[in-house]
Image: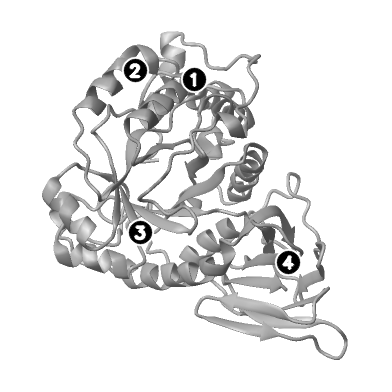
Amino acid sequence: MRKPLLLAALLLPALFGVPTSVQAQEEPTLGKKDYVHPRHPRMDRSRLNIGTYFLKPYAVNDENVRDAKLCGIDFFLCQEYNKEALDIFYKHKVGVEVAWVLPSWWGGGAVPGSMAKAQPLSMYEDSARKFRDHPAIWGMDMGDEPSAPDFEHCGKIMRRMQEMFPNQFIYLNIMPCYASAADNTDEIAKSQLGATSYQSYLDTYCRYVPSDYICYDYYTYASLPYQFYDNLTMVSKACKKTDRSHWIVLQVNSSRPELWLSANQLRYQANTAMAYGVETIIWACYTAGWWYNQVLDTLGHKTQQYDKLRQVNSEIHYMAERYMKYRNIKTDLVGRFPVGQLDTLAFPHRDEMSSTRFHSLRATDGSALAVGTMKPRRGGRAEALFISSNADMYDEHPGEHIIRFRADAKKIRLTRGSSTTVLKPAADGYFSLPMRSNEGVFLEAL
C-alpha cells in the first residue's frame, strides 16, 4: 500500500454501478507448472531479502545508498529510472525495483474491474519496448492493490511482461485483509476488494496471477492489530497450497507524527512474520512516501529510525542464514495473548505446542508466542522452529521469558540475532532458553 485507502475511492463502485463481487469461476487455481518462474539472475531468492519503499531523488547520493546497504537494505522499491542514480545503487550492490517505466495502477483509487479498459496490455508492451536495461534493476513495478475483478488482466500483463523482462521479476502488491475492516459497511468492503471476502480475493489472485510470490502490506500500528495474524494465516496457507513465496510490507514509519516506533515494535512485526514463513520483508518508508517519521527526513538526513532499523535488519539477516534452509509447514499461537491483540474466536490458541521432534513447548510464565514449525527444503529428518515472543507488541512492558520444551534430539542449535550456540537438556530432559520480549529465535533439532 503506497497510501491509505481513501473513502471516496472505496465508494466509486457503488456510485458508478460497477459490480462489487467476483462470481465463482470454473477455472482451477494456478498450479506449480503454471507459474512464471523467471531466472531472477539479479535477486537471489535463496536468501531472505529486505527491501524498503523509496529513496526519493532528494536523498539519492553515494553516502545514503552506502548507508542503506549498511542498514541491511537489499533493494529499494518504486524508484524512478535515472541512470546516474542506478549507477550508484549498482556500485553499492543494492537492487532496485523501478516504477513508472510501465503504466502505473493503484487499485485503491480506481473503479474495480476498470483496469483492462483503462490500461490495455498494448500499453505495457509499448512501454517495455522502450526500456533500456541496467544491471541495478531487479524488478519492474506493474501496480499496487488491484481489486479482484482486475486480477485476470493483471495475470495477462505479468505473463507478457516476464517474457519481455527476462532479467527482472514483475512486482505486484495486493491489499491487506483490513481493506474490509469491521467498521466498514458490506458494500464498502466489497468495493475495496472487489470480492465478498478477503479469502475470495486471495483465491482470485491465485487463480489468475502467475507470480511465484504473494506480497501484501500490513501496518500493525495503523490498523486493527489482531488481524495481523488473520492476514499472515490466510496468505501463508495460500502460499503453501500454490507453492509461492510469502512476502510482506511492514512499517518502520508512523501514521501519527507524535509516534516513533521502537526497535522492539519493528522486531514484533518482523519476527511474527518469520514465524509464518515470510521470505521477503519490505519496510515502509525509508524516505517520504506516506505518513511520518521515516528513516531519512525530508533533507535526506538520518532520523532515530535508522539505527533501530539497522539493528533489527542485522538480526533478521543473521538468523536468515539458517532460516532459509527450511520452509514453514505450520504456525501455532501459544500462551496468553493480550486482550485486543488476537481474535480468540478465529484463533483458538493453546497452552503449549508440539511437532514431530519438539514437544510441550511453552513459556513458563504463559506469555504469548508465535511458533513456526519448519522442515528442510532439501528433505531429511531435521526440524526447526522459529519462535517469536509476542506478549508486548506496544513495547510497554519489556521483560524476559523462559521457554521450555522437550525434543527428540541430544542437542539443539540455537540461532538468535547475533549468535549461534548449542543447547543440551537438563537432568529432567527439558531444554530451556531465555527470550526477551519481541525477540525471535531459531531452533534446529539436528
- Residue 29 lies, with reference to residue 242, above or below; the image says above
User: Could you classify mark 2 by the number of other residues whose Cα lies within 10 Å: few (under 14), some (14-19), or many (20 or more)?
Assistant: some
- The nearer-to-camera label among 4 and 1 is 4
C-alpha gap between disc 2 and disc 3? 31 Å
Query: Is residue 22 visible in this depiction of the protein?
Result: yes
Label placed on residue 74 = 3
Q: CA distance from mark 4 to mark 2?
A: 47 Å
Q: Which of the marked residues, 1 or 2, is nearer the chain's N terminus?
A: 2
- By what rule are the colours in the image chosen? one colour
- The residue that mark 4 highlights is 382
Residue at horizontal 60%, vertical 48%? 232
The label number, if any, that marks residue 121 in the structure image: 2
**Label 3: which secondary element:** loop
- Quadrant where the N terminus sits is top left
**Closest to the observer: 68 or 83?**
83
Give neighbour class at mark 4: few <14, some 14-19, many 20+ (Cα, 10 Å). some
Residue drawn 58% across and 64% down?
323
Q: Taking the image as drawn, is residue 198 in sight?
A: no
Viewer-nearest of discs 4 and 3: 4
- Vertical position of residue 10 compared to residue 172: above or below: above
Farthest-out residue, top: 17
Mark 2–mark 3 CB contact (< 8 Å): no
Residue 245 as seen in the image, left or right of residue 162: right
How far apart are labels 1 and 3 at the CA level?
Answer: 31 Å
Amino acid, disc 1: Glu
Image disc number at residue 152: 1
Which image quadrant for residue 425? bottom right
Q: Amino acid at mark 4?
A: Ala
> Counting residues from the N terminus, which is met first, the one under dot 2 or under dot 3?
3
The numbered mark, 4 or 2, whose residue comes first in the sequence reads 2
Q: How far apart are labels 1 and 2 at the CA level?
A: 12 Å
